Amino acid sequence: MQAHAPDSTQVIRRVDDTAYAFSPARSGLPGVEAGLSYLAPTAERPYNYMYEPPAGIARQNCEYQLRPVWIGDARAMASPPSIHDEGFELWDAPTSVVDFDDEDAIQARYYGEAAELAKCVTGANHAFIFDHQVRQREAGRPALTLGRHGDGSRPGAAGRIHCDYSEASGQKRFENLSLEPAVRTKAHRFAIVNIWRSIGGKVVDTPLAVCDARSISVRDLVLTDLRYRDRTGEMYLVQESTHHRWAYFSEMDRHEALVFKQYDSQVSGVARFTPHSAFDLPNIPPAAPLRRSIEIRCLVTYG
């Protein structure tokens, strides 16, 4: 679906170096140590059902290892990260949408805003929103999963380290999207990005961690099947490596948007995959509101 034009009153800008004015006295970034769920070593191709599976079939055939990881606060970086290098950027991007339970408002207004933001961040010529997901951290904050329970209709926070697209499924998304013939013909490169935003105020319980794409090896990425009622998708789960460098943006508020790379058809010189996962902050205040967020899936083309 091609995005609608954005509300001209909305102003977006990259969160630039002024937001990174302080630097830690010690080496490395300030941040938190928290648990992230890596895929445990397995000889099988992993699968996960995104709904309650048929009787007698396991919901998944893989296990996860919750590892303590240092997650640096990206607001303290000496210079802001780049979607082309690290694979993610934070933008100050207010939205005109007030109620994110209003599906019509999301598609009629937010899609247009998100498409314009995606083009600004990536430098692409065209942007096409093809999906979105509203999530809420589960009441009581149980152990994080892939974010689907029961029939899969009420997604929670996705707490397994993953990349939404593999090499094959990234290409398939481009092939299956209804693009104008002229756009498809001229496209010499395309990418898929996620735009992640809090829709419930400052995030003080379960933010999103992103992994510096430069710290990932192809050996860390494991092809995995996602089984839905009507189809089977393919993504990457991630195995642990001491080389991984993790970051998050503390207390993200609803006027901010985190844009990160899911797939890039350019095979060298740019970030291609950005592993990510929700995680629970240590010492969450007892009265902290449950995190609510929206993620937009967007394909951009160059040329």
Image (tube, helix red, strand yellow):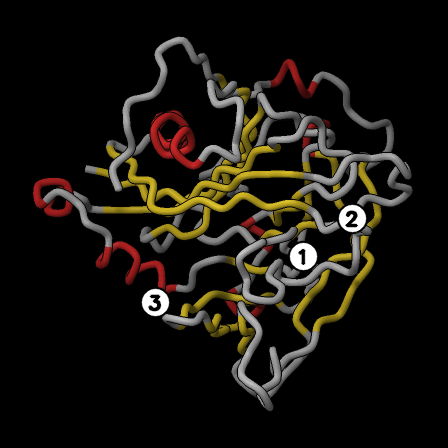
Q: Amino acid at mark 2?
A: Asp
To which residue does mark 3 refer?
168
CB of mark 1 within 8 Å of CB of mark 2?
Answer: yes
Quadrant of the image containing the C terminus: top left
Query: Which numbered dot is residue 75?
Result: none
Which of the 4 quarters of the picture holds residue 232? bottom left
On the question of residue 233 being in view, the answer is: yes
- Position of 222 with respect to 31 (left or right) is left
Query: Which numbered dot is residue 159?
Result: 1
Q: Amino acid at mark 3?
A: Ala
Quadrant of the image containing the N terminus: top left
Q: In x, y percent, where is residue 127?
A: 29, 36
Q: Amino acid at mark 1?
A: Gly
- Few, some or many residues within 10 Å of mark 3 (<14, 14–19, 20+): few
Q: Earlier in the sequence, mark 1 or mark 3?
A: 1
SS at badge 2: loop
Which of the 4 quarters of the picture holds residue 63? bottom right
Of residues 229 and 14, the one drawn nearer to the viewer in this rendering: 229
- Position of 30 with respect to 37 (left or right) is right
To which residue does mark 2 refer?
280
CB of mark 1 within 8 Å of CB of mark 3?
Answer: no
**Is residue 96 positioned above or below 83 on the image?**
above
Of residues 106 and 220, the one drawn nearer to the viewer in this rendering: 106
Give me the residue at 37% from left, 32% from top. Answer: 111
SS at badge 1: loop
Gap in Å between the C-alphas at discs 2 and 3? 31 Å
Q: Earlier in the sequence, mark 2 or mark 3?
A: 3
